[in-house]
Amino acid sequence: MQVDRRSVLTGAAALPLTAALPRSRARAQANKTIRIGVLNDQSGPYRDTGGITGVICAKQAVQEFAPNFAVEVISADHQNKPDLGASIASEWYDRQGVDVIVDVPTSSVALAVAGVAKARNKAYLNTGAATADLTGKACAPSIVHWSYDTYMLAKSTGGATVHAGGDSWYFITADYAFGQQLQRDTTDFVQKAGGKVLGASPYPFPGTSDFSSFLLQAQSSKAKVLGLCNAGGDTVNSIKQAHEFGLTEGGMKIAAMLMFITDVNALGLDVANGLTLTESFYWDLNDRTRAFTKRVVPKTPNNWPNMIHAADYAATLHFLKAVKELGADAAKQSGATIVDQMKKMPTDDDAFGKNSIREDGLFLCPANLFTVKTKAESHGPWDYYKLAVTTPADQAWKPLNESGCYFVKA
């Protein structure tokens, strides 16, 4: 396996990432190379929202930055299993010379990986999970959380739905850390606005594909809003089945609390039109987002980038900039040191523009509330969103004094 200084390698298997090399040679190579591990779901319900497109976007950052030090990108599928995610992270950090892990959807897996990164003082840039605990009670000086979290989603999508008259809710919730926290945060915004939660149906994740019984319970509650606290394939299936049951025809509004443009594409505009959702990135938002998308789409033409994919690019790019500033040798010694350098430097990339990373590791960017277009309003492939409102970066996220992060100064 020949590796030049700008090569980007992708390993599809979970653990035997250096099987082609003797262990001693692999370690020697790792000692001289900045290694980036993209860990995500490549075969389950989040394979389109992250998956191989996320790997491609991380590779895009390396290609564009063209560093004067050697860089490798490797990848693995955590299969939405916390124990597997933690095992891969340990293997990567301890024996494969990985300097930073990027992506990691599924909040239970993300929290498990966060524990590994914290224990080893290794850099971890989460772009795929929503749990706000990554910059709260599970924070660490070596962790950054990019693009969205449960608080931001609840405030943007949930808050807008309540203000539009949706003052009674029923939730269908993926029963793990992400879904539970998203339901909790949305409930808080609903109740503070004077609304009520009439019930909830938690369901086992992963593995649920039939949502009919939960939808019937939601329908019988007479709630005005069906809040979907799930993501990826589960959101797509929930909305399709709600459409088949005629829930919206009966006057119930669907609030997809975490939805991506890849989900809209899977649903089609006949089903998805009129839905509201929040993403911090949209390909057609401005000239810079269009330029980024134009560079990426030829490599992934059937799965245009969403905010996770864009964050894989942006986080990797900013990490490499920090490595250049600090020096590769110093960057490899301490995750906290390299992340501290990332916090000192303003972020600037074509996906998100100019932003910053807060003391607790939270990437601060605007939150964009979109409405999905009708077929008549759409003028071409993936032309799906109308911008409804943008919440500025200094208002979209949980205040720093409420983060609960142990190392944040009062």
Image (cartoon, rainbow, N blue to C red):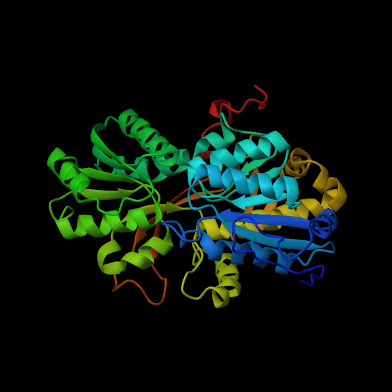
Q: Is residue 308 above or below residue 345?
A: below
Please count the marks in the image. 0
For the residue pair 384 and 219, the one nearer the viewer reads as: 219
Q: Is residue 145 left or right of residue 8?
A: left
Residues 59 and 26: in front is 26
Of all residues, the one furthest to the top in this rendering is 410
Q: Could you say where residue 409 lies in the image, as x and y percent from the top left?
A: 68, 24
Relative to 211, 1 lies left or right: right
Which residue is pictured at 56% across the width and 31% down the height? 136
Quarter-of-image position of residue 405: top right
* Residue 187 in the figure: left or right of residue 167: right
Vertical side of 234 occupied by 165: above or below? above
Residue 205: x %, y % from top left: 37, 45
Where residue 69 sits in the image (x, y, percent)?
84, 61
Instruction: Give how far across and how far down residue 4 sits, in percent.
Output: 81, 70
Between 402 and 27, which is closer to the camera in this rendering?
A: 27
Asked if residue 153 can be seen in this view, the reply is yes
For residue 341, which quarter of the picture?
top right
